Amino acid sequence: MGDGRGPIDRLKAGLGTFTKSEEAAAHYFIEHPSAVLNKTIAAVAKEADLTTTGIMRMCQRVGYSGYAEFRFSVNRDLMSHGADCTEREDGSSMTALADAYATYLRKTADTLDRQQLARVARLILGARRISIWGVNRTYESVQQLSTRLFRIGIFNQITPDPQIMDDISTILGEGDLCVVMSMNGRGTKSYSSLMSSLVERGCDVLLVTMNPKINLLRYATESVVLPWISNDYAGGFLEDQMVVFMYVECLLHEIANLVNRE
C-alpha cells in the first residue's frame, strides 16, 4: 500500500475489512496512536486487552512487514505532523529539535534487525580484508566506521574516490568484505557495476542506505536500510548522518559482544 497515506489513515480506510481481532486493534490505535511508542507488541496487547496475533495481522493487512515497521511509521507520522521546530522566543524549538533527534536515535536502535546486526558483525570479524566506500557527505560516516574499527583492532581501508574503488574491485575476492554507504543513491554512478564485479569475485558486499527503493539493493549480498530522517521529517532539514552514526555504534557494540563471548 505505497499510496502515501499515514498509518492511522490506512487503519481508518481498512475498517470493515479486518477480522474481529484486527478490527479491535485498529480501533485502539486510531483512538490512541501514541500508545504504540516505545512499547513492545506484547506490552500493547496486555495494556489494551488485544492479542499479539491480531495486532501483527492488522499491521500486515495495511501494508507493513510487521509491528516494528508499523510502530516506527506511527512515530514518524506523529513527529512530522506534531513537532514544530520553528524558532520561538522561549527557546522551545531547541527542545523540539533535540526531541526529534532523540526519538529517531531510539527508533534506530529499537527497530534494528538483531539477527542481521549479528550477521554483519560476524562478516566484519571474519573478513580477510575490509574496504569501506562512500562519497560526498556520506564519507563522514565512512570515516567514523573506519576509525571505530581501528580502535578495536580491525584493519580496514576507506576511499571516496571512484577510480580507487574501481582498482579495489579487481583486487578483493573471496573472504573479503566491501562496505558501501549510499544513503539516498545519489553517489557515484559506478557503484552498481563495481558491486556486481565484487560479488562475482566472491567478495561479500554490505550496502548501508536509507532509501528502500535504491537500485543498488540488488547488487549487495547484505543490505541495511536505516530510517531516513531527512526524508521523513516535515521540512526535511534534519541530519541523516546522526542516524548512521547511531547504527555504527550499535554495530560496534555487537562486534564487541561477539569478541567477548568468543
Image (cartoon, rainbow, N blue to C red):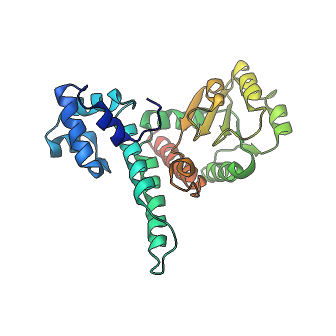
Tell me: 159 left or right of 43: right
Residue drawn at x 73%, y 25% as measured from the top left: 198
State the residue at coordinates (55%, 36%). 224
Quadrant of res 196: top right
Q: Is residue 259 left or right of residue 40?
A: right
Viewer-proximal residue among 60 and 246: 60
Residue found at the very far top of the displayed protein: 200
Question: x, y (%) of residue 40?
Answer: 28, 43
Does residue 157 sit above or below 198 in this rendering? below
Can residue 173 be seen in this snapshot?
no
Residue 161 placement: quadrant: top right
Question: In screen coordinates, is 6 left or right of 24?
Answer: right
- Observer-nearest of 1 and 174: 1
Q: Position of residue 54 (x, y in %)?
A: 22, 30
Where residue 36 appears, as percent x and y from the top left, is: 29, 47
Quarter of the picture containing the N terminus is top left
Tag count: 0
Residue 8 in view (yes/no): yes
Asked whether 258 or 162 is in front, the reply is: 162
Q: Quadrant of residue 44?
A: top left
Q: In the image as oriented, which residue stretches furthest toward the bottom?
A: 89
Vertical position of residue 45 compared to residue 200: above or below = below
| Position in image of residue 88 (x %, y %) | 48, 76
Residue under the point 44% across and 33% down: 115
